[in-house]
Amino acid sequence: MEFRSVRTVLPGDLVSVEASDIILGPGLMQNEESIICTKAGVLMKKENSWFIDSDQKRYIPATGENVVGRIIGKVGEVYRVDIGSAHQALLPFLAFENATKKNRPALNIGDLVYARISLANRDIDPEIQCTNLDNKADGFGELKKGFMLKCSLRYCRRLFSLKTQIMESLDKKLTQKGIEIEVAIGLNGRIWFCTEKVKHAIVFYNALKEAETMSDAELLEILFSLKTQIMESLDKKLTQKGIEIEVAIGLNGRIWFCTEKVKHAIVFYNALKEAETMSDAELLEMFKNLDRKF
Amino acid sequence: MSRHEPIGPQGLRQDGRRADQLRNINCKPSVLSQSDGSSYIEQGYTKCLAAVYGPRETRQKAQILHNKALITVEISLAPFSMSERKKRKKFDKRLLEIASAVKQTFEPIIMTNLFPRSQIDIFLQILQYDGGMTQICINAATLALIDAGIPMLEYVCACSAGIVEDTTILDLNNSEESLGIPELTVALLPQSQKVTLLQLETRLHVDKLESVTAMAIKGAKEVYKKLDKTSRDYIGDLLQKSNPT
């Protein structure tokens, strides 16, 4: 049975529940006889469990969650890792698969790691490990190259819970094109991904950023969105003519592009400017026929 | 001349408001992308921008509290905020006093015991000043803390009131403040009806205290209605958009 939303709440709102045996989740606190909401969000309930679905950027560590962290120092036998929480996390040298005193991990300051929180308590610094409970790597460890993006916690949780569906649909479509994307979703508001070509990374980044305010169904759609279609159609036709254009679309109202010849840049610029007032269908049509203008 | 009288013959103030009328409030949460929480609020012509960072690592080892989070408040008044351009020092006594009042207002309601040895920073920037500094700082900080998702027992609303020639007036603007009349700022917890801050400028006769306080509390409840509606609409929209259930 899914959780269902009750209403929007703000800190200080009282929740009236008749049942005597209820489980309170994040954001709810019991004060003598009454239950108070301490966070702003949507109150969710499932049988006797209640919690508040809220959004924030600052991560509060909890045991068992997977996080993406950046190494910021080495102290004695541990690495100090920034996971976006109030305190820096500790990653012992031995918390890697096949690590022994003589066989140390070769990580440097500035490297990214995907780890699991092994110990989290409000009074002490959190500890993380790059292995799962059976001491196997299981995907944890150093994240080489790639790009890390920061987003809200709630978005990461959604992506994490939908990950199997996303992975399946993406897997099928992208392997057809020979595009590989490696993704690591940290529940601390950080998503890391690595692609072979920069343009694929740009497309994926934009898709991820846009999808933050979409519903689950749209989320699965957008990850194979308009931009990829544009990329495909342009790619085929322009490489036939020996023209290469690299484009970066910023959601801050800036579009960057680079071509070899100035005249191609001028044609592309005019095309983009013209297309600003077109509908989605016309836009796609225009891009499909762009090669004719060259 | 009626221009210099705070209350004119028809019971209207200089800016056309009645004695118990608040200025127009416009507010918006989540205006900055780089901070954990932020808000922008306008009360009449007074405009304030708030940014909240935290809970994060404490900057100075000497200030770490072992059992709860440290709350720091920093207020700055932009040089272009008043009619004459004037660069204010960061450690201006008046600003420090107001920052300390804001800190005291939030200390009992933020659940600091959940984040020992960390720090919650509240930065307030006044972009335009037309009276009511303490109240707007508290209102802006409230919205920003809600946006940052920092657990609080309740949220605070503040309002100021004064008394001139035996009439209590609500929400003083700059020209009324500079008349030197007593101004009382009240910070109220609207659900539990408790007061977390009571601050008075100049002197007030004790017989008048009750009526001025009652007026300020009434104003704070009006502010609460506005902030409440804005926050609820914003949160509802945000979460509904990404998960219509």
Image (cartoon, coloured by chain):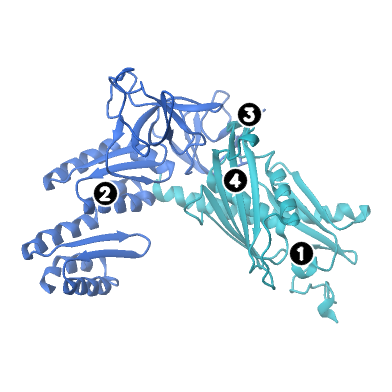
Chain colours: A blue, B cyan
Three-letter amino acid code at the position of disc 4? Asp
Within 10 Å of disc 2 (Cα), the crowding (few <14, some 14-19, many 20+) is: many
Query: Height in image: B16 above or below A18?
Result: below
Q: Are marks 3 and 4 in contact (CB under 8 Å)?
A: no
Depth check: give the residue in front, B177 or A22. Answer: B177
Query: Height in image: A247 above or below A66?
Result: below
What label sits on residue A118 in the rendered view? none
How far is the residue under mark 3 from the one under mark 2?
45 Å
Are dots 3 and 4 on a single chain? yes
Query: Height in image: A147 above or below B23?
Result: above
Q: What residue did someone put label 2 on?
A: A223
Select label 1 or label 3 by which is in front: 3
How far is the residue under mark 1 from the one under mark 2?
53 Å
The chain containing the residue under callout 2 comes to A
SS class of the residue under badge 3?
Answer: loop
Q: What residue did someone put label 1 on?
A: B172
Select label 3 or label 2 by which is in front: 3
Three-letter amino acid code at the position of disc 1? Leu
Q: Is residue B224 visible from the viewing direction of this image?
A: no
Q: What residue did someone put label 4 on?
A: B121
Are dots 1 and 3 on a single chain? yes
The chain containing the residue under callout 3 comes to B
The chain containing the residue under callout 4 comes to B
